[in-house]
Amino acid sequence: MNKWTELIVGLILVIGAIIIAWYSQGWSWDFWHAAGTFFLGGLFWLVIMIGALFILLGISDLKG
């Protein structure tokens, strides 16, 4: 991937996950509330980690 594309995609994923988590605090699912909360928390951290990975790869490509 292009170094700038990696940085942009990483920033979009990280900022998007934070914004979605901020707006979805009042929402709840109709089935097994605890399981839904666990899944959403795991999904949030997965997107954050992928975004951080893209940011680190983009910074690494800028140095090289």
Image: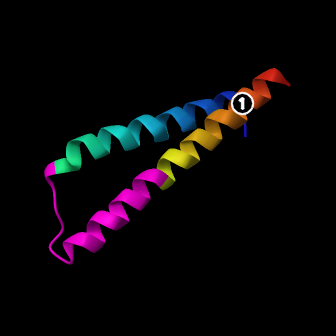
**Residue located at (36% from left, 39% from top):** 18
Residue 30 position within the rendered picture, expressed as x and y whole percent measured from the top left: 14, 73
Q: Is the C terminus in the top left, top right, bottom left or bottom right quadrant?
A: top right
Residue at the extreme bottom of the image, as rendered: 31
Q: Which residue appears at 27% of the width and 69% of the height? A: 36
Q: In what quadrant of the picture does the N terminus appear?
A: top right
Q: Residue at x 30, y 44 (%)?
A: 20
Instruction: Give the colouring mode of the picture.
Output: rainbow
- Residue 38 image offset from top left, x and y in percent: 34, 66
Q: Is residue 60 above or below residue 44?
A: above
- Front-lying residue, 6 or 29: 29
Nearer the observer, 38 or 46: 38
Q: Could you classify mark 1 by the number of other residues whose Cα lies within 10 Å: few (under 14), some (14-19), or many (20 or more)?
A: some
Residue at image position (71%, 37%) is 57
Q: Quadrant of residue 39?
A: bottom left
Magenta segment: 26-45
